[in-house]
Image: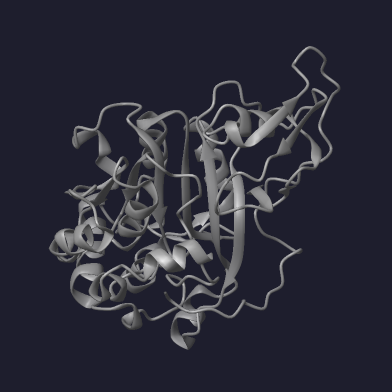
Amino acid sequence: MEKTMSTLHNDVQDYYGKQLQKSEDLKTNACCTLVAPPEHILNALKNVHDEVVAKYYGCGLTIPNELKGLRILDLGSGSGRDCYIAAQLVGETGEVVGVDMTDEQLAVAKRHIEYHREKFGFAKSNVSFVKGNIEQLDDLGFEDESFDIIISNCVINLAQDKNKVLRDAYRLLKPGGEMYFSDVYSDRRISKELQEDKVLWGECLSGALYWNDFLRSAKNGGFTDPRAIENKPITIDNDELEEKVGEIKFFSVTYRLFKIDGLESDCEDYGQAVKYLGTIPTDPHAFDLDDHHHFPKGKIMSVCGNSYKMLHDTRYKKHFEFYGDWSTHYGIFEGCGGAMPFGNSISDDCADGSCC
């Protein structure tokens, strides 16, 4: 029998609240970060309480740059690790709100609010945690267009109604805001039989998003041009579970989804260009918009209309100079890569890494 939404939620709460006590209890490496975080994230991580870190079950890097003073929502915040990292980056003038439905995880996150306030040297905490289901964000009283950034770390795959999560995220973002998140993706749709497996679901495998379904859902939710930041193959490293999933291949992918009016479904050429000024403190030499847009400081580079808007209509505007207008359309822009975030260009050999 197909799982009901309430049964699924109960299974997830049980897995992350009772069966898992620390990251080492995971049976696969799907919920592990496979790349080393940048230096400023590592420095922030040093200030996060050991218990919060020990109960981290994320699969990627979900905290973008240029966050000072922003309001951030973390979907499926768990023990609060990413919230407490982001809290340092937004500073006292910013705010971070975490949403999670598992009581045990929320208890860990809330237990250390005062510890982190003192550790950060803030007069008052800029972090709060709310009990709630990410599939029911409309029940939590958040105002529309009230967040600058929405992050999520290996959680949306655990949701049954992923379309609603994306629609609600779009609704809650301010214009020019973005959803920046990591999750587990598959190269094909997962069978209902595998979706019924509690361990595979809890390990973020049988709820994985088939990449093409995700792209369709994101666009239907309002995020016209999803951009992949990085992707890594996932090795399960568990003989029993590998036998169950068979030939399905899994990937950890980080996406950024901008809420910008006027983005087109394809990359169109209007003769525009940008120059990165090198003024983002964490990226003094070059800025990466996504996995195929690398902007060295001082170099004027041609961009499609969508990329132009992602830099011009967002918090990144002050860090670039912009050239050209929308007066002439020159056809399709040839400089952008395809939409598929993984494929033959990526080695099947998983990069070395471990849980943070």
User: In the rendered image of this protein, does residue 335 appear above or below residue 239?
Assistant: above
Question: Could you tell me which residue is drawn at 34 percent across and 83 percent down?
Answer: 24
| Figure disc tally | 0
Q: Is residue 315 visible?
A: yes
Q: Position of residue 166 (x, y in %)?
A: 42, 39
The answer to which image quadrant residue 83 occupies is bottom left
Farthest top residue?
Answer: 327
Residue 100 x %, y %: 24, 54
Query: Does 83 sit above or below residue 198?
Result: above
Q: Is residue 134 left or right of residue 348?
A: left
Residue 273: horizontal and vertical position, in percent? Answer: 78, 31
Which residue is painted at 66% across and 34% down in the image? Answer: 320
Q: Is residue 173 left or right of residue 52?
A: right
Taking depth in this image into account, of 257 and 109 the one nearest to the observer is 109
Q: Up-down: is 111 above or below 307?
A: below
What's the residue at 44%, 85% (across, down)?
Answer: 240
Along the horizontal axis of the image, is 288 left or right of 260? right
State the scheme by which the image is colored.
Answer: one colour
Q: Name the quarter where the N terminus is drawn.
A: bottom left
At x 37%, y 29%, the residue is: 171
Residue 209 or 16: which is nearer the viewer? Answer: 16
Vertical arrangement, residue 188 with respect to residue 98, above or below:
below
Q: Where residue 179 appears, x then y in whole percent?
A: 46, 42
Asked whether, in this view, residue 153 is left or right of residue 280, the answer is left
Q: In this rendering, does residue 58 appear at all?
A: no
The C terminus, quarter of image? bottom left
